[in-house]
Image (cartoon, coloured by chain):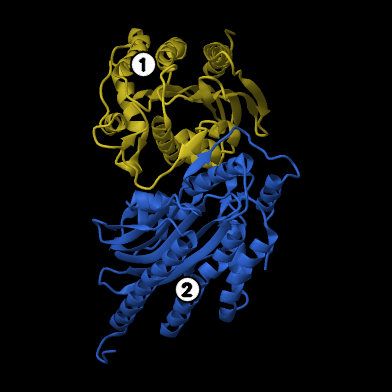
Chain colours: A blue, B yellow
Amino acid sequence: MQPHMNTATQKNVENKSLRQHWVAYVHQLQDRICQALETADGKAVFFEDQWTREEGGGGKTRVISNGTIWEKGGVNTSVVYGAVNDKMQQQLQVADAAQWFAAGLSLVIHPLNPYVPTVHANWRYFELYNAAGQITDSWFGGGTDLTPYYLFEEDAVHFHSTIKNAMEPFGSELYPTYKKRCDGYFVNTHRNNETRGIGGVFYDHLRPANDEDALRLFNFQQANGNAFLQGYLPIVERRKNMAYEARQKHWQEIRRGRYVEFNLLHDRGTLFGLKTNGRTESILMSLPPTVRFEYDYHPLPGSEEDKLLQVCLAPRDWA
Amino acid sequence: MQPHMNTATQKNVENKSLRQHWVAYVHQLQDRICQALETADGKAVFFEDQWTREEGGGGKTRVISNGTIWEKGGVNTSVVYGAVNDKMQQQLQVADAAQWFAAGLSLVIHPLNPYVPTVHANWRYFELYNAAGQITDSWFGGGTDLTPYYLFEEDAVHFHSTIKNAMEPFGSELYPTYKKRCDGYFVNTHRNNETRGIGGVFYDHLRPANDEDALRLFNFQQANGNAFLQGYLPIVERRKNMAYEARQKHWQEIRRGRYVEFNLLHDRGTLFGLKTNGRTESILMSLPPTVRFEYDYHPLPGSEEDKLLQVCLAPRDWA
């Protein structure tokens, strides 16, 4: 650290370094996750689309499709920045922000077999700067959530316990708080407040109070990112060879319709991305491959399909 | 008309009658359209869901599915009213409205055969009232548009010409104005401003200046509603027996994905309905039965699929 810098510049420099470390981490995590998913599949491989953004930055979109396990999936990183425009100003509700920076990893995996759950995860870091280029705000956000088509309680317990264990060293209040936030976020309010799936965790605006705190939050993000494969893959292994028929596929596609409804009607990330001239293909990569919309569809009361629906209407504690 | 009423009350009474006539018309049109679509199909029939709305009014949702021609379709009427709430106040941007009334017919038909176009139409009438129960504003809106998966120029010409001819007696400037408005409305702004289909007409806020004008606008609405079958069915007859293969079905489902994106991301009617506690199933009846989302999908340049896409990227004049 240069001793003759003023505090704002110092903070800027240190955060630049935090920024760099974060960018390195998400790229390394992207490699690790893609590799593990390819190994699990044994057939399909990711193809990478590198893109740049006119206003600043770009990303690496990695897409997999038509695998033995993965019907469609994306594991994307992006490192983007630019001037704060009117729409962002509105959403961020800050007056003095002139420039912004964001980097993160975002993934959605849609398996072919209706007994294997869809999974979503996202870990991100933001910085805002004033007109003088000084950092005025920074925060971490993230989370992961599971969208099964059939409920296996042991899978729900495994997924949630893995996250809980990863968060535990950072405070035992974190998992229950962020679990509740997840249940409150992934909700189709237009469908009786039905959740998208069986939840996970969701957190945002984790602002470092100082450098030490920034390191703590960076470690917290890594703990979550690193726990992802461990939370998801064992479930995949347990379900991937289960035989299914047209009925299960039909139900999967109906539920995927709810996934589409949530993402296009309610998901703040999707809407923010599309409004701020984000890369449409990378954002809408999250949409499932085949989807079905039927008028007023209800599963038979008491059926396995209904069991899943009921748990979306009344979220439970799993860990 | 009662000679001792004040002007506001008179207007109210006359409009009540206009309201009644309009409600009778949309129900009669609903019967006529459903009957004609059933006859064309020869197998599937509409089933009717009557519903009521806690805040006031209700509707008749009529749904057809798994026909020889119609894979999924709905022809709905609704007659709804209530107190103006905050969200409506925002959208309507009027200060003195206390109560509202709306009645209309809304239809979306998704055929099975990718050579038969999807069609949408809507005709509606609104009234606003102040706290004293007097009408303070009223307007008609409506339109119809065609979403083919393959471009047949003669179909586009027939569809647009039928509308143009129906509108002609009311002023030759109407069709070109409302055609342009349609091209400007059904647009996926997040996809290079690609239109949903090859358009039609779209108009709103047609406010009667006086009683005579109200009658003229009522006749205009009927001319449009009555021309619907004539504009659509001959196209269906021409295309319904064309053989198709997996490639055409695949493309239809990809384009249906764009239909979903438009309806959930951009359609004001859909978003307004879901925000104002409208009936979700009747609103989302518009979504196609089977849909496909693929990452960064582009048809082969110069292919029949691409021909359709190009006309969505640069709308043409058809009549």
Mark number, residue B304: none
The quadrant of the rendering that contains the C terminus of chain A is bottom right
Residue B51, how many percent across, how many down? 67, 28
Do the residues at pointers 1 and 2 share their chain?
A: no
| Circle 1 Cα neighbour tier, 10 Å, few/some/many (<14 / 14–19 / ≥20) | many
Q: Look at the image and tell me whether residue B94 can be seen.
A: no
Using the image, determine if residue B68 lies above or below residue B270: above
Residue B118, how many percent across, how many down? 44, 25
Q: Disc 1 sits on a residue from what chain?
A: B
Three-letter code, disc 1: Phe
Q: Quadrant of the rendered structure where residue A74 is?
A: bottom left
Residue shown at 60% from the left, 78% from the top: A168
Residue shown at 62% from the left, 74% from the top: A173
For the residue pair A87 and A265, the one nearer the viewer reads as A265
For the residue pair B141 and B191, the one nearer the viewer reads as B191
Residue B17, how many percent across, how many down? 57, 13
Q: Which residue is mark 2?
A: A221
Residue A171, how many percent across, how many down? 59, 79
* Residue at far bottom of view: A3
Q: Which residue is mark 1?
A: B159
Three-letter code, disc 2: Gln
In terms of secondary structure, where does tag 2 sit? helix
Q: Disc 2 sits on a residue from what chain?
A: A
Q: CA distance from mark 1 to mark 2?
A: 56 Å
Residue shown at 52% from the left, 49% from the top: A112
